[in-house]
Amino acid sequence: MRIVLVGPPGAGKGTQATRLAEKLRIPHISTGDLFRANISRQTELGKLAKSYMDAGNLVPDEVTIAMAKDRMEQPDAEGGFLLDGFPRNVSQAEALDELLQTEGIKLDAVLDLEAPEDEVVKRIAGRRICRNDSAHVFHATYSPPKQAGVCDTCGGELYQRDDDSESTVRTRLEVYHTQTEPIIDYYKAQGLVVTISAMGAVDEVTGRALEALKRGE
C-alpha cells in the first residue's frame, strides 16, 4: 500500500506510522528522517537543506520533494510506503501527485488521525523529559514520575521542553490548521481520505487504522 499519514501534532503520528509500516511491511518515510539522513550523508540535497536551516529559513518545497522522490525510488519502497510529514501543504500534495503519475503509480489511502484540540494540548504540554537522558519521558497526567520533577530511572531532573509549552503547542496547531489541514479536503476530492479517532490505547488506534485501511481498499 501507498499511504499518506496526516493529523495534528500530538495525535501520535510517529508512533502509529512505525507500527503501521511494520504491520504492512512497507517503509516508514518521515520528513524528519529524510532531512537527518541527507544531512548526515552530506548529499547535495542535504547540504542545500542545511544551508536554509542554518540561516533560520524553511527548507523550500522543491528540496523536500526531491528528497522524498529519491527515497521513494529505493528498492524497499517498490511495493509501497507510508509517508509521515509529507506532503505538508497542498502544493506538496500536487507535486506528489505529479511525481507518482510519472511513475505510473498512485496513493491507496490518506489516513487522517483525529484528536480533539484540548486533548492534543494536554498530551504535549504534559510531557516531562529527563535532563540526563532524553529517552526517559514522563507525562504529568498519564505517566507521572513517583516523585514530582525527578526521573524514576536515574534520578535526573525532569523538565518541559520549550516547544512543549501550551502556547507553543497552540501555535503549532494553528500552523497545522492553516498549512497542512487543507490537504485533507484536497485528498477527499480524490476519495482517498480515511478518518479515524486517535484517542485510546496505542494498540487500539493501530487496530482501528488497519481495519479502516482494509475497508478502504
Image (cartoon, helix red, strand yellow):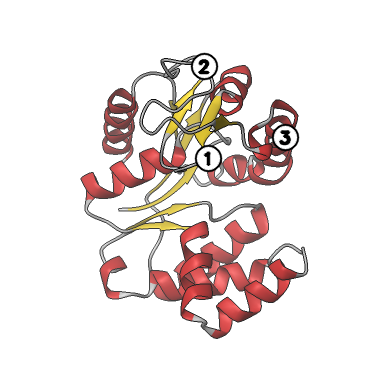
> Mark 2 belongs to which amino acid?
Ala
> Mark 1 belongs to which amino acid?
Arg
Which sits earlier in the primary sequence, circle 1 or circle 2? 1
Identified at 56% across, 55% down, the residue is 87
Q: Which SS class for mark 1?
A: loop
Q: Quarter-wise, where is residue 49 in the image? A: bottom right
> Going by the image, does 216 lie left or right of 88?
left
Q: How many numbered markers are drawn?
A: 3
Residue 78: x percent and y percent?
A: 28, 69
Identified at 29% across, 49% down, the residue is 21
> Mark 3 belongs to which amino acid?
Thr
Identified at 56% across, 85% down, the residue is 44
CA gap, disc 1 and disc 2:
14 Å
Label 1–label 3 contact, CB within 8 A: no
Q: Which SS class for mark 3?
A: helix
**Whether residue 111 can be seen here:** no
Which sits earlier in the primary sequence, circle 1 or circle 3? 1
- Residue that badge 1 annotates: 131
Residue 208: x percent and y percent?
A: 31, 27
Other residues around mark 3 within 10 Å, as few (<14) / some (14–19) / many (≥20): some
Other residues around mark 1 within 10 Å, as few (<14) / some (14–19) / many (≥20): some
